Amino acid sequence: MIRTILMLSFWAIFLPVAALFYFPWVFITGDVLPLYRVAMFGARTGVRIAGVRARAFGLEHLDRSRTYVFMSNHVSNIDPPLLIPLLPGRTSVLVKKELFKVPILGRAMRMGSLVPVDRGNRDAGIAAVRDAADVVKQGIHMTIYVEGHRSFDGKLLPFKKGPFYLAEECNIPVVPVTISGTHEAMPKGRFSIKPGVVTVTFHPAIEPANFGTREDLTEKVRAAINSALPEEYRN
């Protein structure tokens, strides 16, 4: 519990201070990269304060000159601050629209080209995919938790269709990602964080020429993510 409070307290202090220094820079220059980098530093430092460490496998196979759609499983609130700082270059994320109402945080997410999505509105979901496609066409990665929300038991839930429409429309490679260990560190429904090591596995990219049908691509991504989960969580 104490580590969790320390992590949240750090973020509560760090975010306004970073905004004070970096928001004017973005307004004046239009360059969001320094703000993005300091945000990644804050995310990474916060989870370390909580006692959680990430081990990444497979990053060496990514071509830093290319743009990817990263598709990951999702079991914990600490998945994003663990995964996103590991990614090469700059990424956008589909984020539930309610978070854009949070002062400072919402403004920072808009500056970073993050995409709001209304999970309960199908038409809004389609619009979010279009907005995400516009971001990807700028050469920014897109990171998506393909189940749409967190799993209670660590096993994969059914995948949403939107990410696969996005991959087809943008015609860029898909990288399946498996996060393993955050279910033990901070499962859905629990506030406190248990220190430990989390494994993040980046699977080989699936090239557009190998997508097949949308259903084929969905199964390929599911099989890849599932393969690196602990045996007790595999479907």
Image (cartoon, grey):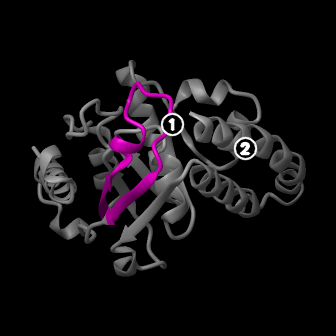
Q: Is residue 28 left or right of residue 84?
A: right
The nearer-to-camera label among 1 and 2 is 2
- First in sequence, mark 1 or 2: give its number: 2
Residue at image position (69%, 62%) is: 37
Q: Is residue 192 shown in magenta?
A: yes
Q: Find residue 112 and report its horizontal and vertical position in percent.
A: 65, 50
Amino acid under disc 2: Phe
User: Quarter of the image holding residue 155?
Assistant: top left
Q: CA distance from mark 1 to mark 2?
A: 22 Å
Q: Which of these two is toward me, 163 or 144?
A: 144
The range drawn in magenta is 172-201
What is the count of numbered marks?
2
User: In this figure, which residue is indicated by the disc labeled 1?
Assistant: 95
Q: Is residue 136 visible?
A: no
Q: Find residue 209 and report its horizontal and vertical position in percent.
A: 19, 69
Q: Is residue 165 left or right of residue 34?
A: left
Q: Secondary structure at mark 1?
A: strand
Residue at image position (80%, 41%) is: 13
Which quarter of the figure is the N terminus placed in?
Answer: top right
Q: Is residue 64 left or right of residue 35?
A: left
User: Quarter of the image holding residue 145?
Assistant: top left
Q: Is residue 108 shown in magenta?
A: no
Q: Are the residues tagged 1 and 2 within 8 Å (C-beta)? A: no
